[in-house]
Amino acid sequence: MGQTALAGGSSGPFTPQAVYPDRSRPEGLEELLSAPPPDLGAQRRHGWNPKDCSENIEVKEGGLCFERRPVAQSTDGARGKRGYSRGLHAWEISWPREQRGTHAVVGVATAHAPLQADHYAALLGSNSESWGWDIGRGKLYHQSKGPGAPQYPPGLQGEPLEVPERLLVVLDMEEGTLGYAVGGTYLGPAFRGLKGRTLYPAVSAVWGQCQVRINYLGERRAEPHSLLHLSRLSVRHALGDTGLGHVSALPLPPALKRYLLYQ
């Protein structure tokens, strides 16, 4: 995926502007996604933890993917290796739509959240130690058993938003918010009041042999930047995705072209 896009591809005609007024991206998100992605070693260090998951889950590729074993009447979760208490973080979850089943929940959890239940349920978000978005039902869960859970994004009429295979999770520990993006559009904060905690990427699943991938995209700390760096951000914003693809044709010194492209 291109680093200037938020996540996935187009999710159809959905326009959150019409239904969700609080849709502004967290400060620094565009900068985070414009920077070069972390190398493979860093992504694995922020990947799924084989020592911190349900016994019915097998972590593969050094943490980049997990597969749930086909166990009946069980809900199984996995937690990331790294917990975050400061900064703005973003990671992409790739979860094929045909492998989600009745309860596919994506979000964050503390180190104390349970990762297995002996029944089918939206495990992530069912307690005080986790927060999750059920990407099939479009519901938000925290200390929730399901009924009465709020819709996300709110304001949609009829069926919930169709979430594509890839979605972006955006955790802002400076502001204490968790939000999501699909099809290149940030949907707004789903949860607030998360400051003061240490939170890990997490999912819970029920579909046998489903494979869920995680791709850590980086971190931004709330620190001042140089005027040169801020100028780069302004130029990249003005060029847009299409213009950035033609930077090499601009009448600029090679060093400046490389700087604009984070090379």
Image (cartoon, rainbow, N blue to C red):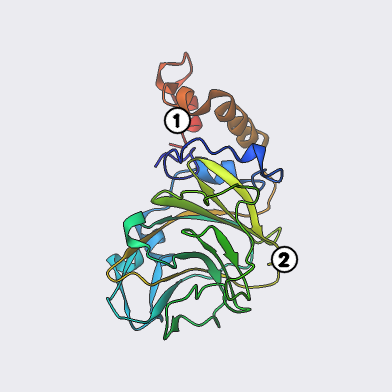
Sequence-first disc among 2 and 1: 2
Residue named by callout 1: 258
The image quadrant that residue 133 belongs to is: bottom right
The answer to whether residue 126 is seen in the rendering is yes
Q: What element carries label 2?
A: loop
Q: Position of residue 205 (x, y in %)?
A: 40, 70
Instruction: Sort mark 1 into few (<14), some (14-19) or many (20+) by Cα contacts within 10 Å.
Output: few
Vertical position of residue 24 compared to residue 116: above or below = above
Image coords of residue 16 (percent x, y): 61, 41
Residue 219, picture quadrant: bottom right
Kindly give the residue lying farthest to the top in the view shown: 251
Residue at 40% x, 21% y is: 248
Q: Disc 2 vs disc 1: which is toward the camera?
A: 2
Q: Quadrant of the C terminus?
A: top left
- Looking at the image, which is closer to me, 124 or 121? 121
Callout 1: helix, strand or loop?
Answer: helix
For this orientation, the residue located farthest to the front is 158
Quick one: label 2, few (<14), some, or many (20+) residues within 10 Å? Answer: few
Distance in Å between CA atoms under marks 2 and 1: 40 Å
Provide the residue designation for mark 2. 193
Vertical relation: 113 (above or below) 63: below
- Residue shown at 50% from the left, 26% from the top: 256
The quarter of the picture where residue 1 lies is: top left
**Image spot of residue 65 (x, y percent):** 33, 64
Identity of the amino acid at label 2? Answer: Gly
Judging depth in this view, the residue of 64 and 116 nearest the camera is 116
Establish if 171 lies above or below 207: above
Residue at (42%, 25%) from the top-left corner? 245
Amino acid type at image mark 1: Arg
Depth check: 154 or 21 in front? Answer: 154
Does 200 sit above or below residue 3? below
- Point out residue 158 in the picture as x, y percentages from the top left corner: 56, 49
